[in-house]
Image (cartoon, rainbow, N blue to C red):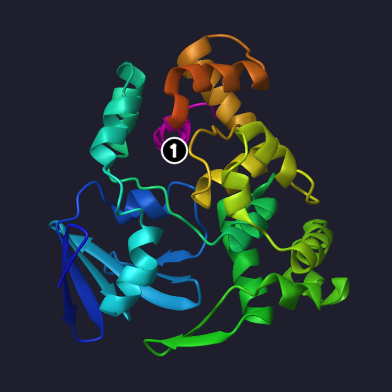
Amino acid sequence: MRYRGYDIYEEGNGVRVEGIRDFDPVHIFECGQCFRWYREPDGSYTGVVRGKVANVLFRSGILKLDNVTAEDFKQIWFDYFDLGRDYSLIKKAVTTDGIMEKAVEFGSGIRILRQEPWETLISFILSANNRIPRIMKIISEISRLFGTELEYAGKSYYSFPDARTLAACSLEQISECRAGYRCGYIHETAAAVAESGFDTDRLAGMQTADARKELMKYKGVGGKVADCVLLYSGTRYDVFPVDVWVKRVMEELYFGRVASFPEIHRFAGEKFGQYAGFAQQYLFYYAREHKIGI
């Protein structure tokens, strides 16, 4: 079957997709944008997306998705992996200097995932002042305690609970996920979203500054978390998430001095424009793996 430029073949319990470029699961799943994927001994990754478990293996230009049908690929995975976007054009647009040339080359297989917005909101509320292994553990616990069990390859996985499910829980119940003070943020945010919904289409129609302010109404959402939610839900790509560590990276790579958060945002906006989010991801992965700003 041919679908939007890709050849898709159903094989056993999954699909094989040919014609994919600019794709590396290591770069995608380990660049800090997601927390539900786990590397297997054979180099593949298993994760849960929108209530579906899948195993992802990419070798020699061929993407193999196990526990996935051709219809699943069209309905979920094509958009999730942002396969409708030509990343060669993105790379060309953000390669504005020698630093970005190195960063893009190093993370050449990065794609920004279009993640489920509600799960992304909670995930990045949990990410503030937290390390990735701990974030992954907390999200796993939330899913185990309140999500739906899913079986794959003899193991149990769990979907991420929706806002109504978490809103119906007491703070004491949510505290079982051991997220500390963030449990209160989860509890309040779930209640707010359960009541009013979470409309990313409306956010996408706003000016970026207004969309950021709208997200910051939720408990536990500051500017950096808001930018992450906008970027990793596929809502806005002109944001450049900056925390204390990214600030140090930018100071070391570009400023050569102490710079303020607003100064860094202005610099990124002027330098990368509508592609700022992509540039941040390439820089983040390159700097982290090379221990820049540490």
Left or right: residue 79 versus residue 191 is: left
Left or right: residue 201 versus residue 260 is: left
Q: Which residues are magenta?
A: 275-294
Q: Specify the quadrant of the image occupied by residue 162.
A: bottom right
Task: Give percent across and percent down for residue 172.
Answer: 87, 74
Which residue is pictured at 26% across the width and 77% down the height? Answer: 70
Residue 248 vertical position relative to residue 285 in the rendered view, above or below: above
Circle 1 packing at 10 Å, graded few (<14), some (14-19), many (20+), is many
* Residue 243 visible here: no
Which residue is pictured at 60% across the width and 53% down the height? Answer: 200
Nearest to the observer: residue 38 or residue 28: 28
Left or right: residue 196 versus residue 34 is: right
Q: Specify the quadrant of the image occupied by residue 197.
A: bottom right
Tell me the element at label 1: helix
Residue 1 vertical position relative to residue 126 in the rendered view, above or below: below
Task: Give percent across and percent down for residue 160.
Answer: 59, 73
Which residue is pictured at 63% across the width and 14% down the height? Answer: 259
Quadrant, the C terminus: top right
Task: Give percent across and percent down for residue 32.
Answer: 49, 48
Residue 279 vertical position relative to residue 146 in the rendered view, above or below: above
Whether the magenta-drawn stretch holds residue 290 is answered as yes
The disc labelled 1 sits on which kind of residue?
A: Gln
Nearest to the observer: residue 144 or residue 217: 217
Whether the magenta-drawn stretch holds residue 291 is answered as yes
Task: Give percent across and percent down for residue 168.
Answer: 81, 78
Quadrant, the N terminus: bottom left
Q: Provide the major secondary structure of the magenta segment.
A: helix
* Residue 237 visible here: yes
User: Exactly how many numbered labels are in the figure?
Assistant: 1
The residue at which mark 1 appears reads as 281
